[in-house]
Image (spheres, rainbow, N blue to C red):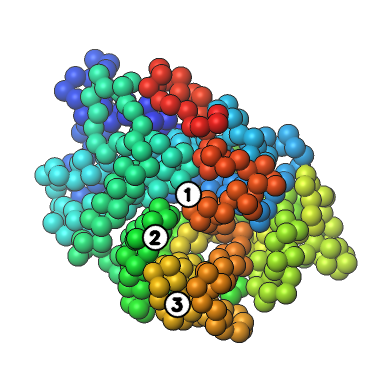
Amino acid sequence: MSYNKISLIVAVLLLGALSCSKSLIDLSPQGTVLESNFYQTQADLFQGLVAAYDPLGWANNYSMKMGLLNAASDDNYAGGSNASDQPGWVAVDNFTTNPSLGPQADLWSKNYTGIYRANLVLEKSVGNLTGLTPDLRARYVAEAKFLRAYYYFDLVRWFGNVPLVTGPIAESAIYSQTQSTPAQIFAQIEKDLKDAIATPQLPETLSSDELGRVTLGAAKALLGKAILFQNNPARMAEAAAIFDDIITSNIYSLENNYADIFKPDNRFGRESIFEVSYSNARKAGWELGFDGNEGNIDVQFCGMRDFVGTTYSNGWSFCPVSTDLVNVMKNDPRFSATIIDGNALKAQGASYTAGYQNTDYFMAKYSPLAAFKATVGEPALNWGYNYKEIRLADVLLMAAECFNRSANDAKAQTYLNRVRARVGLAAKTSSGAALLNDIYTERRLELATEGIRFWDLIRTNRAGTVLGPLGFQTGKSEYLPIAQSEIDLMQGNFKQNPGY
């Protein structure tokens, strides 16, 4: 499905205008399907739900979540052809974003569009729609609440204080919207997810034609992540119990072979709890640019530039792997599934053009493989790699952390060592603070280059120490600035984040 990016103001304007008795423009189009008369049947509401899922996969150059988060961490650099290739990426990498430079406008737009669409499903679900059974209504509502929580979870982590919009807004109130605190946003996230979890119609497993939709396990995992991110020691046991419920359900299991997790044809594998779907069937071409395609652009961005050789296809050399991560992982059995050694490839006769910040090490997990290159449309825009948003190993390690921080080291060791055993590593026997450090180290190794490291450093208050030498400023760099365009539209009602 193609899309148009909508800022908070436009989204609110649409939601308010279409929900009021008087339209902003007094026109009555003939032969046109409008939002006000579209939602008549169960199928119509389902189309609205599909539209609410759609922004999950939006991936233009400034809204691709994984690549930007990797660049912000110590796992990767920005990369590209040169420093002026994508200035916003470079600014994220060295923490020099400002209200007019960076990815903030697209990230803001992407998530508020998703929220607007989820709100619309929730609003229209209460109507008398033909063919909508109580069970379907309950499931659609649960999915919409999960999606709203998901989008707000990204927004609160990217920006901190953001407007909380959960329904129609009167036209007169559009420009008087104010920002809610992170605590208020997290309270709404938790409420939405708990509502979804309490819905019996939200399935534990999916049929083959429903893969990509929300499950009970996904809702529980996101709730646990949201609680953990708030870093309240008093709530660690609560989060541990949520993660433990997922693990002991036995619905998910670790892949026997670590590298299999990331194979493009291993979609919705046994370890997957929630993944964002992409497709190579759109046949997108450059006439659409980045917008309107259904492919995973992160894959094209992280490939080796002008690559000539076997196995891989060429890419644009973004997110080169840092030498720090290489040194940390060089003796780890997950190295080859995580990092491509460019010098080893060149020794075998391959070649590529060294990009900006080149280290000769590249991301392997989402590398553009020649065998999966699209044969229709523009290949760069049509990579059908799903993004593994939440997988069992992540949940096991979050559970280990929460059990350790709630004084249950035996359970923490058990879950940490399940992850290590999968790749043949010896069990850890540490306890207390040493065990917590082992868990943090394991998270970096297991989840390297998956867009998780940066927010792990933020939520554990280690970002200043780890990222300070790279430009991170405590009290500022935890959040992106709010785009100047949003500040201007709100006519002084929005406060800019500290330091910007």
Coordinates of residue 245 in the picture (x, y in percent): 32, 73
Residue behind mark 1: 57
What's the distance in space between the residues labelled 3 and 1, CA to CA? 38 Å
Q: Residue furthest top?
A: 26
In this rendering, position of residue 206 left or right of residue 299: left
Question: Residue placed at 74% from the left, 70% from the top?
Answer: 330
Give the mark nearest the N terminus, 1 or 2. 1
What's the distance in space between the residues labelled 1 and 2, CA to CA? 33 Å
Query: SS at mark 1?
Result: helix
Query: SS at mark 3?
Result: helix
Mark identifier at residue 233: 2
In this rendering, position of residue 53 left or right of residue 394: left
Residue behind mark 3: 409
Question: Residue placed at 30% from the left, 53% from the top?
Answer: 190
Depth check: give the residue in front, 268 or 433.
Answer: 433
Is there any visible trace of residue 466 in the rendered image?
Answer: yes
Tell me the quadrant of the picture where the C terminus can be found. top right
Q: Amino acid at mark 2?
A: Pro
Q: Amino acid at mark 3?
A: Asp
Q: Amino acid at mark 1?
A: Gly
Give the mark nearest the N terminus, 3 or 1. 1
Mark identifier at residue 111: none
In this rendering, position of residue 210 left or right of residue 364: left
